[in-house]
């Protein structure tokens, strides 16, 4: 299992074990309520998923780079859902 797969698995475990739905997880980590996850909010999610602090910033940037389809440097609910759907496959 690659490091990427391990990280995605930790995120999946966090969401399935601690939240009723992925939408509830998204809303929980959207601390300012703007319906988008910023890099800082994604880093909080990664911290809760027990991803090492050393690499959290890099991973948050990579997640934004990989899933931010509209180029605003934020992850919307639809982008988050697409990521979760990919992780769950």
Image: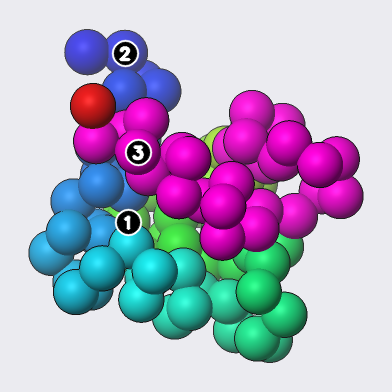
Residue nearest the observer in this picture, 49 or 67: 67
Instruction: Check the image and name the residue furthest to the right.
Output: 72
Q: Residue 45 appears in which quarter of the rendering?
A: bottom left
Marks 1 and 2, Cα distance to the nearest angstrom? 17 Å
Residue named by callout 1 = 49
At x 24%, y 59%, the residue is: 14
Residue nearest the observer in this picture, 23 or 44: 23
Residue named by callout 3 = 85
x%, y% of residue 1?
22, 13
Instruction: Judge whether 59 appears above or below 49 on screen.
Output: above
Over which residues does the magenta segment extend? 61-88
Residue nearest the observer in this picture, 87 or 13: 87
Marks 3 and 2, Cα distance to the nearest angstrom? 19 Å
Q: Is residue 80 left or right of residue 1?
A: right
Residue named by callout 2 = 2
Residue contact between numbered discs 3 and 1, judged by CB atoms under 8 Å: no
Marks 3 and 1, Cα distance to the nearest angstrom? 17 Å
Q: Let me know if residue 66 is in the magenta part.
A: yes
At x 39%, y 69%, the residue is: 23
């Amino acid at each position: 299992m690659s490091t990427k797969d391990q990280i995605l698995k930790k995120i999946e475990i966090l969401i399935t074990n601690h939240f009723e739905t992925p939408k509830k997880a998204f809303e929980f980590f959207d601390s300012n309520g703007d319906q988008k996850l910023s890099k800082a909010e994604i880093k909080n999610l990664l911290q809760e998923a027990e991803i090492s602090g050393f690499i959290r910033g890099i991973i948050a940037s990579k997640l934004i780079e990989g899933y931010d389809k509209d180029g605003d440097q934020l992850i919307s609910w639809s982008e988050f859902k697409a990521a979760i759907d990919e992780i769950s496959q």
